[in-house]
Image (cartoon, helix red, strand yellow):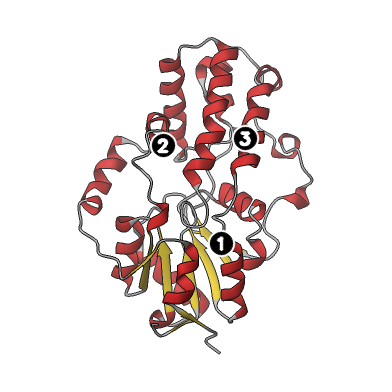
Amino acid sequence: MSERISLLILDFDNTLFDWFHTWYHSFSPFLDELLKISGVPREVLIDEIRAVHQAHGTSEYSFLLQEVPSLSAGLGDATLLQKYDSAIQVFREARRANLSTYPDVVPVLQEIRNQGCKIAIFTESKGFYSSYRLRRLGLDPLVDALFSPDDHSIPDEINLATHRTKDESEYGLKHARHITLGATMIKPAPDVLLSIVTEFGAKISETAYVGDSLPKDIQMAQSAGIIDVFAKYGVARDNPKYRLLREVSHWTKEMVEAEKPAQNTHVIPTHELSRFSDILSILNFGSNK
């Protein structure tokens, strides 16, 4: 075992839960329902959805219907939501059914907390979606802080007070602090990683970082001098269903080109996990007190 770890920083998507599984099984039936109701050709709808996602820097944009021209043309917000209500319900039900942590995540995080180690999540996903998932997955009580980019802008015509379907107390985190990092933050960002260490008053030598991406997570941790742990179980990008995500992705050509140097760098992780619970046999957790 390595030196005692008093701060564990975790990537979120595909490290603690299967983000792609949740996204695909929510978005795919949603798209099918939109196509059925609207009659818009698939290639037209795909192109318009991708443009909206790229404009807002996320493939999970909540106000997609309001900004896709072929769906919103000539319809007020209320009428639009009525026309596509079945698609909205299909999406919500599928998301609830398919959002869950990997099987061993909750008990392992509880064990790590019991040993006195602080736990933070550092994600590229927008703040609203990340905090929603933290609540729904039951991770809020187990995490000390969530670090995420700021949320995207909201259309001028949207009134959140009337748009939201739950009481205001149902939004936001109850235990974990939520610290936003600016709207354009993307990994690898070793300076941000080090700022999280500083935020907790931890030592670099007593900090470990776990993530599923070799160029974004592992290379970042190594650049920061932090113990790196590769969640190799989260890597499944050869899945043929990824085609849909690529079709509507918020990643622009410029973003893809900017990431190529990191993708082409050969990164060798210090530690690897076949499942999340392996971390208990790799690292020794404790308090810095």
Question: Which circle, 3 or 2, is nearer the viewer?
Answer: 3
Lower position in the chain sequence, tag 1 or tag 3: 3
Residue drawn at x 29%, y 41% as measured from the top left: 256
Q: CA distance from mark 3 to mark 2?
A: 21 Å
Are the residues tagged 3 and 2 within 8 Å (C-beta)? Answer: no
> How much space separates mark 1 and mark 2, taking CA atoms?
31 Å
Q: Which residue is mark 1?
A: 104
Towards the viewer: 15 or 161: 15
Describe the element under mark 2 as helix, strand or loop: loop
Q: Which residue is mark 2?
A: 250
Which mark, residue 94?
Answer: 3
- In this rendering, position of residue 68 left or right of residue 268: right
Q: Please tell me which of labels 3 and 2 falls first in the chain.
A: 3
Between residue 12 and residue 202, name the one nearer to us: 12
Q: Residues within 10 Å of mark 1 (few under 14, many from 20)?
A: few
What is the x, y in percent for residue 277?
50, 67
Residue 139's x, y, as percent?
63, 60
